[in-house]
Amino acid sequence: MRKKGRFGAHGGQYIPETLMNAVIELEKAYDHYKEDPDFNRELNTLFNEYAGRPSRLYFAKKMTEDLGGAKIYLKREDLNHTGSHKINNVLGQALLAKKMGKTRLIAETGAGQHGVATATAAALMGMECVVFMGEEDTKRQALNVYRMRLLGSEVISVTTGTATLKDAVSEAMREWTRRIDDTHYCLGSVMGPHPFPTIVRDFQSVISREIKEEIMKREGRLPDAVIACVGGGSNAMGSFYHFIEDRDVKLIGCEAAGRGIDTFETAATINTGRSGIFHGMKSYFCQDEFGQIAPVYSISAGLDYPGIGPEHAFLHDTGRAEYVPVTDEEAVNAFEYLSRTEGIIPAIESAHAVSHAIKIAPKMSRDSIIVITISGRGDKDCAAIARYRGENIEE
Amino acid sequence: MSRIKKAFENKKAFIPFITCGDPDIETTESIVNEVIKAGADLIELGIPFSDPTAEGPVIQAANVRALKNGITTDKIFELTKRLREDTEIPLVYMTYANVVYSYGSERFIGKCSEIGIDGIILPDLPFEEKDEFSDICKEKGVDLISLIAPTSRQRTAMIAREAEGFIYLVSSLGVTGQRDRIDTDLSPIIKTIKENTDIPCAVGFGISDPTQAAGMAALSDGAITGSAIIRIIEEYGREAPAHVGAFVKSMADAVHSA
């Protein structure tokens, strides 16, 4: 009864007492509405008419031919309204918050994709919205800051700590303890205290449900591997979920290795972290010997986080999913490769997944199938990647 | 009788909070000695954490300063051991769950017991998750302090019944730090607490002057002050001990006459 929201040893609710009733109420509301036909109808209509779901499963013919191995399909979450998978979770949570009588949404954001999605849902549903974003990220994702403001949200630049995603989460949690009554914390990934990892996973699991349906239609069988990038891990969890029971489908999460897992400038949690308690959950975290959370680094603001969702930690423990590191350089190469080869500019986050597919596809037989989730589109990253390549362009 | 129990015996307690290692460990040691002289009844020693999600800007900044200056859990254990040689004042650690868990909960709590720490406060450890720590705490004779908040409502009785040492009643919503006034009506919460436990209950968060401290102590069994002390340390640095002493004396006097 006591231990809620556990994935093996991971998960739980490590939050201040001030927030406990808020998460208990959220859990109750979610348990009620997830079974409610009206709620699901409303959400499906939003998914379909507003977000543009189902998203396409695109056969990447040129990439497949170029790599000469497995057939490659791209799950095009980048084509969703607002340009990433984040909208799936946000529409679900915003609708739930509205049913709970909340009038204000707060959110953290790294790359700005979750912030933009939350600002969008708030505009749509007539709710107030405040987004917390690390100062460092407001610089590297300036376009998204403007988008959020345009959508009517307040963006608060967080200057504490490393001024990146983890600090944005901390600040959003602090704000939630200040103001609970009218405010829902729209957490953007499969992390934080229970019930968030479960709620976010369920709303994102539409990705794997669609992949499964579509690939069965097109190929008459399940894929051999599903590959997605992992920061907190929401697009990966959504991409994996309906395949967990299908033991023959390899599930591969791609972590941001930054400048390499043998350096301190990395955000590869599974590969370099250890068990810890932070941001409401027990999971793996990059930390020092005294449990101080490490100042992680990745070129990708969306993966630049020192932890990973508890269900991923569990999938790692049980060996059901594999988590591989991908460096900045490899991700940038893949970013350029997909743009050139398929005319699709992926988010730098998603490019981490593309990179790993480029590595393994040639070693697989021609009748095998890989699905890569393109979690978002890369327009937001163009200026930063140009800078990475030594070219200064005006945004 | 435990040292914590004694601190509340026949009087209201004033409880100062000090971030260890801010600005350095020697200054922390002098500050602790000053606040003992000034009439503090129990001391909360903060072990800095990189990402203290329950703290406002003042204590966050103190954590950053202390960590930057190389403070570690082991150095704080050494400091505590030295302090314990000269004083019987109850000492409790205030830190975050990961600092304990990551060190090895058995090892950390065992160390606490060995060096004379009386209790541990972990603001990110609610009732539902406390067993993995409280079982070890019971075995080692260290009190795991429970927090109750204005939003606890139906949870208050449940938490109070299993509480140990003293109860840390959070005065109002939000993180630590100064507030102009505390609007929460704490009386009904304290009444529920008293109906469910005999252990004392002290109020903290946002108590920054003697009037507020006396007011809170009059309602409960004591008052806790952190950010107002840390601001003095921030301002005076190594010269802070005497200033902190004077401030704590004014707070302790107000609480003792409440």
Image (spheres, coloured by chain):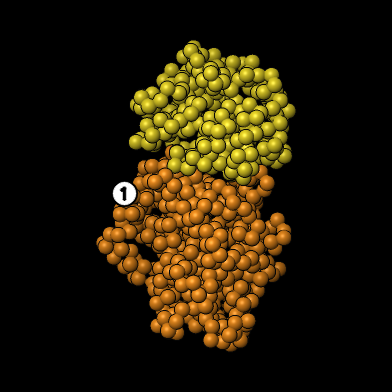
Identity of the residue furthest to the front in this view: B139
Let me know if residue A376 appears in the view: no
Is residue B190 positioned above or below A180 on the image?
above
Which one of the lettered chains is coloured orange? A
Say what amino acid the circle numbered 1 marks: Gly
Is residue A162 positioned above or below B160 on the image?
below
Is residue A393 positioned above or below A179 on the image?
below
Labels in figure, total: 1
Q: Which residue is mark 1?
A: A101
> Which chain letter goes with mark 1?
A
Disc 1 crowd rating (10 Å Cα; few below 14, some 14-19, many 20+) is few
Which x, y percent locates residue B5? 51, 20
Camera-side residue of A346 and A199: A199
Identity of the residue furthest to the left in this view: A38
Which x, y percent locates residue A214? 41, 79
Q: Residue at x 34, y 70 (%)?
A: A49
Camera-side residue of B213 and A137: B213
Query: Is residue A35 toward the left or the right of residue B136 in the image?
Result: left
Q: Residue at x 64, y 15 (%)?
A: B37
Is residue A12 positioned above or below A224 on the image?
above
Could you tell me which secondary element the residue under label 1 belongs to? loop
Q: Residue at x 62, y 30 (%)?
A: B113
Which x, y percent locates residue B230? 61, 30
Chain B colour? yellow
- Quadrant of residue A356 in the image? bottom right
Q: Residue at x 53, y 75 (%)?
A: A225
Let me know if residue A161 appears in the view: yes
- Quadrant of residue B161 in the image? top left
Query: Is residue B110 toward the left or the right of residue A209 in the image?
Result: right
Which x, y percent locates residue A299? 64, 62
User: Which quadrant is the C terminus of chain A positioned in?
Assistant: bottom right
